[in-house]
Image: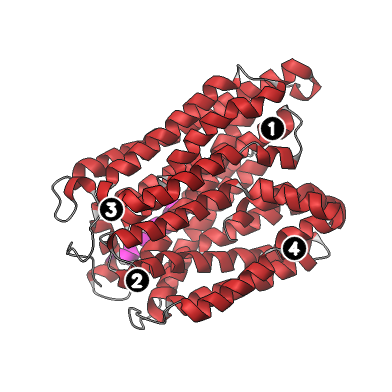
């Protein structure tokens, strides 16, 4: 639910505008407010889960998500819908760190890898299928009811999750009650807000002055890390104990996730733009156009989860390379495809890219958290997921900017093959930027692969199996 709502609303915006008379600025904030609020809270949510119980925080988050989804669907206008989306994003950001923390707590060895593999399937499908699901619901309900179904669909699903969570999730271990680092949370939230706000607003406004927000972001994040280093050194209660980053596998995994999510979420965005603007597809047809990517992800994720503890970091490196090869193949066939043949020509490259995505996301999470004490699993997962959210926003902004910058002036006056070719060139430019992000992610994967060889408990970069001792991080 939480990941689907990142992309599903994009498809519903025209219907929302027509039904509620929301202004263009309000329509942009219906999307941006969710992304911003979702990205602000994972680290804080992880700390609360570690200290007060992941089951409790998960249930609170799901309940909030259900209520805010219902409020979104009932909203009569843009203002209330934006407020509801903020609450929805905060609730989603509260849920996700508890998931990784609960997996750390409940599973060991190869079972943990398989559990993360299932999550990987959900991550890939939730990210890729948003336009398809949104288009289908709007087609089902029509322009007035359809966009409301996009939000209402979360209510019965969320209610079922609440029942299951109360029955099956353990009440067990927390790290004990600790003083919450409110100042650290404010500094981190402010820095992340500056980064995310600049990224999502640039995606809409193309105003280069937004780059100036990097300055306060650097100041706030620098202050945050200095404060957390002091609290870590003195044995106080930091929001993020920086001893987490003493584990090279964790640091490399966070950085790899940051750059890979730039590529993975930016590519479907420009594909949807190409389908709808360049080829004149409907929202539903555009969603169908990336189902091959979702299929590849759903195939690879559970398989990768089963073998990650045996193969280790080489699996992540190979998956990153596979995604890059799929994106490269897509770029090569763009210019050679037209009209009704596009979906068929794109299917194999997108399937290969999906295989790479599915085989990377949760294996990287499994390996990054392998040496982290489960007691602080939610905090560690929150940091990792924050890097993913930042990567998603930056990737969509930069790759989207490359796409629009490559469009010639007067492109809207073109028709037929000329229009398709112009948008195809823009897609090719966006894919080139995507490959740059993939190259950086691949470099971090190779670096960690080299560093982990010979490290105790990580033979050739594999994850610890069973009850193998790896001198875990402790508070």
Q: Quadrant of residue 101?
A: bottom left
| Residue 294 to residue 156: above or below | above
Q: Earlier in the sequence, mark 3 or mark 2?
A: 2
Residue lying at 29% horizontally and 70% vertically, measured from the top left: 231
- Answer whether labels 3 and 4 touch (C-beta < 8 Å): no
Q: Residues within 10 Å of mark 3 (few under 14, many from 20)?
A: many
Which stretch appears magenta?
217-229
Q: Which mark is residue 81?
A: 4
Q: Residues within 10 Å of mark 2 (few under 14, many from 20)?
A: many
N-terminal of the pair, mark 4 or mark 1, is: 4
Say which residue label 3 marks: 309
Asked if disc 2 and disc 4 are in contact, CB closer than 8 Å, the reply is: no
Residue mark closest to the camera, 3 vs 2: 3
Earlier-in-chain disc, 2 versus 4 = 4
Contact check, label 3 and label 2, Cβ < 8 Å: no
Residue 169 at x, y = what percent? Answer: 45, 77
Image quadrant occupied by the C terminus: bottom left
Q: Secondary structure at mark 1?
A: helix
Q: Main secondary structure of the magenta part?
A: helix
Q: Which residue is mark 2?
A: 105
Determine whether label 4 and label 1 are within 8 Å by CB.
no
Q: Which residue is mark 1?
A: 275
The numbered mark, 1 or 2, whose residue comes first in the sequence reads 2
Q: Is residue 388 magenta?
A: no
Choose mark 4 or mark 1, whichever is in front. 1
Q: CA distance from mark 1 to mark 2?
A: 43 Å
Question: Residue drawn at (51%, 76%), measured in percent from left and top?
Answer: 165
Task: Name the side, left or right, on which 432 lies relative to 470.
Answer: right
Cα–Cα gap, marks 3 and 4:
44 Å
Spatial CA span between label 3 and label 2: 17 Å
Rendered location of residue 458, percent (x, y)? 19, 52
- Secondary structure at numbered mark 2: helix
């Amino acid at each position: 639910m939480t990941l689907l709502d990142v992309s599903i609303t994009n498809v519903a915006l025209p219907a929302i505008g027509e039904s509620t008379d929301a202004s263009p600025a309000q329509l942009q904030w219906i999307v941006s407010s969710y992304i911003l609020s979702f990205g602000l809270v994972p680290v804080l949510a992880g700390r609360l889960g570690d200290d007060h119980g992941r089951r409790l925080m998960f249930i609170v988050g799901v309940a909030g998500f259900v209520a805010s989804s219902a409020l979104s669907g009932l909203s009569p206008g843009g203002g209330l819908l934006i407020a509801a989306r903020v609450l929805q994003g905060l609730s989603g950001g509260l849920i996700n760190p508890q998931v990784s923390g609960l997996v750390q707590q409940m599973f060991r060895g190869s079972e943990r890898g398989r559990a993360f593999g299932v999550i990987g399937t959900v991550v890939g499908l939730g990210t890729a299928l948003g336009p398809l699901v949104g288009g289908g619901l709007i087609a089902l309900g029509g322009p007035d009811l359809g966009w409301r179904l996009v939000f209402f669909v979360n209510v019965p699903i969320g209610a079922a999750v609440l029942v299951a969570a109360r029955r099956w999730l353990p009440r067990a271990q927390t790290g004990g009650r600790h003083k919450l680092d409110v100042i650290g949370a404010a500094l981190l939230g402010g820095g992340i807000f500056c980064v995310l706000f600049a990224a999502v607003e640039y995606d809409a406004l193309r105003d280069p002055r937004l780059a100036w927000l990097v300055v306060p972001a650097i100041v706030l994040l620098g202050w945050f890390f200095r404060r957390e280093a002091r609290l870590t050194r003195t044995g106080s209660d930091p929001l993020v104990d920086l001893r987490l980053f003493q584990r090279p596998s964790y640091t490399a995994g966070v950085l790899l996730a940051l750059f890979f999510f730039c590529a993975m979420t930016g590519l479907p965005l420009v594909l949807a733009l190409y389908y709808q603007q360049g080829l004149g597809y409907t929202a539903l047809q555009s969603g169908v156009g990336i189902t091959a990517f979702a299929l590849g992800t759903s195939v690879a994720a559970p398989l990768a989860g089963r073998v990650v503890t045996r193969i280790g970091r080489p699996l992540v490196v190979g998956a990153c390379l596979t995604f890059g090869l799929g994106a490269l193949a897509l770029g090569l066939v763009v210019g050679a495809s037209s009209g009704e043949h596009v979906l068929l020509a794109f299917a194999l490259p997108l399937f290969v890219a999906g295989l790479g995505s599915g085989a990377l996301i949760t294996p990287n999470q499994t390996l990054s958290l392998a040496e982290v004490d489960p007691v602080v699993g939610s905090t560690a997962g929150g940091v990792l997921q924050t890097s993913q959210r930042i990567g998603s926003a930056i990737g969509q902004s930069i790759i989207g900017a490359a796409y629009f910058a490559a469009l010639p002036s007067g492109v809207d006056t073109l028709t037929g093959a000329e229009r398709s070719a112009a948008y195809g060139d823009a897609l090719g430019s966006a894919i080139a930027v995507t490959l740059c992000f993939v190259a950086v992610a691949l470099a971090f994967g190779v670096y960690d692969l080299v560093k982990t060889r010979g490290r105790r408990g990580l033979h050739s970069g594999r994850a610890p199996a069973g009850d193998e001792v790896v001198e875990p991080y402790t508070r």
